[in-house]
Amino acid sequence: MIPYGRQHITDADVAAVVEALRSDWITQGPAIPRFEQALAARVGAAHGVAVANATAALHIACLALDLGPGDRLWTSPNTFVASANCGLYCGATVDFVDIDPRSYNMSVPALEARLAAAQANGTLPKVVVPVHFAGQSCDMAAIHALGQRYGFRIIEDASHAVGGSYLGQPVGACRYSDITVFSFHPVKIITTAEGGMAMTNDPMLAARLERLRSHGITRDAGLMESSPDGPWDYQQIELGYNYRLTDLQAALGHSQLSQLESSVARRHAIAARYDAELADLPLITPWQSPDAHSALHLYPVQLDPARTALTRRALFDGLRAAGIGVNVHYIPVHTQPHYRRLGFSRGQFPVAEAYYANAVSLPMFPTLTEAEQGTVIAALRHLLA
C-alpha cells in the first residue's frame, strides 16, 4: 500500500536518538531547549515551547490567552477536531467560520461578515484560530487587521505548515498572531513521533506556556506566593498539565530540522507533477496563493461533479483497491456527533461541506518515488476514463 503520508527517518535521526538515550537525560534535559531555540531561529520567532503534541499546544495557547467560560473561540470547520476542542477544554463556546472555496482556509469575507453581526449582538470571539490547511497559510494580514478592529486574539493552527511561508516570512514568525502552533506527528513535515510546539514573540506568554505544560509549577521566587523554603522549593501557582516533550523526542526533532527545506522542496516537485498530469482529468487540484509558499503537507483533490458521474466513494474504493492509501481531510468538525449535540447541524457551513463531499487526499511525502507517483496517476486515469 502506498500511504497518503509517511515519516522519513534517516541514520542521522537514529544516531541523535541513540545519543540522547545514552546521555544523562532522557526526559527533561538539554535537547528540549536546543530544539526549541533551533526551530524558533528557523522561523523567526522569539520563543518556542515544545509540548507532547499539537493538541496540547493549542490547549495551553488558549489558556495562556485566558480563554475560559463565557468566552468564544472561532475556528475553521475544515480541520481536525483538535482546533475546536481546545476551546471546549477551556470551557469556552466554540463556533466556526466557513472556508474559501479556493484555498480551503478560513474565508476572510465570511469572517468579516460574522464579526460585524457578532458585534451587533454582543457575541464577539475572544480567540480566533485560523487553520493553515494542507500547509498553505491563511490570509493572516487580513485576519490580523480584523483582530485589531474587533479585539480578538489569534492562534495560528499551523500543524500542517512548518516550512511554509507567507508574504516572504516563515510561518511561525507570529507577525500576525499571538501564538503559532506546529505539529510533529509522523505524517507531518518533520516528526518527533508525537509532539508539537507553540511559537510566540511575547516573553510573558512564553513563560506562561512553559508553566502550563508542566503542572503550573514555578521555581521562580519572584512568582511564588511566599518565600521559598530552600533551593529545592517549587510552587504550583495555577492549574497546569503534564504536556512535556521528552529529550528523546526533542533529539529526533532537532535532527529532523536538517530535512525541513529539502522535504518541502520535494513536496513541491511532487505537486508540480500532479498538477501537470492531472490537469485533463475531472479533478480540481489545489490552488496555491501567490502570497504564500505552502509546506504541502497534503495534496487534496476534488472530484468535479460537472465533469464526471463517478462518486467520491467509488474513487476512494477504487484507489484503495489499487494499493493506494488515499484518505479524506477533513470531515467538517460541526458535523461530528459531539458538535451536533452542542447544537450544530449539517448545512451551516456549506462551502466546507461541499469541499468535503468530493475531496480525496493523494499520497504526498518526500520519499514518494517517481514510480509510486506514476502508479497513483495511472490509477486515477483508469478510474476517471
Image (cartoon, grey):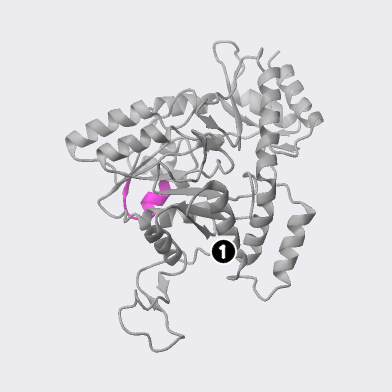
Looking at the picture, how far across and down is residue 336, in whole percent? 44, 40
Q: Residues within 10 Å of mark 1 (few under 14, many from 20)?
A: some
- Please give the name of the residue rendered at 31% of the width and 56% of the height, measured from the top-left corner: 66
Looking at the picture, how far across and down is residue 328, in whole percent? 58, 33
| Residue 260 drawn above or below residue 196 | above
Total marks shown come to: 1
| Residue 283 drawn above or below residue 12 | above
Please say whether residue 89 is one of the residues in the magenta stretch: yes
Looking at the picture, how far across and down is residue 83, in whole percent? 44, 45
Q: Amino acid at mark 1?
A: Pro
Horizontal arrangement in the rendering, residue 261 relative to residue 305 (left or right): right
Looking at the picture, how far across and down is residue 113, in whole percent? 28, 28
Please say whether residue 350 is one of the residues in the magenta stretch: no
Q: Quadrant of residue 375?
A: top right
Horizontal arrangement in the rendering, residue 307 relative to residue 131 (left or right): right
Q: Look at the image and give the residue range highlighted in magenta.
A: 84-93
- Please give the name of the residue rendered at 74% of the width and 67% of the height, measured from the top-left corner: 19
Main secondary structure type of the part rendered in magenta:
helix
Q: Which residue is at the far bottom?
A: 229
- Please give the name of the residue rendered at 41% of the width and 51% of the height, measured from the top-left corner: 86
Q: Report whether residue 364 is seen.
A: no
Which secondary structure, mark 1?
helix
Q: Which residue is tagged 1?
A: 33
Query: In which quadrant is the C terminus drawn?
Result: top right
Q: Quadrant of residue 239?
A: bottom left
Q: Which residue is at the far right?
A: 371
| Residue 255 drawn above or below residue 84 | below
Q: Report whether residue 245 is seen.
A: yes
Query: In which quadrant is the N terminus drawn?
Result: top right
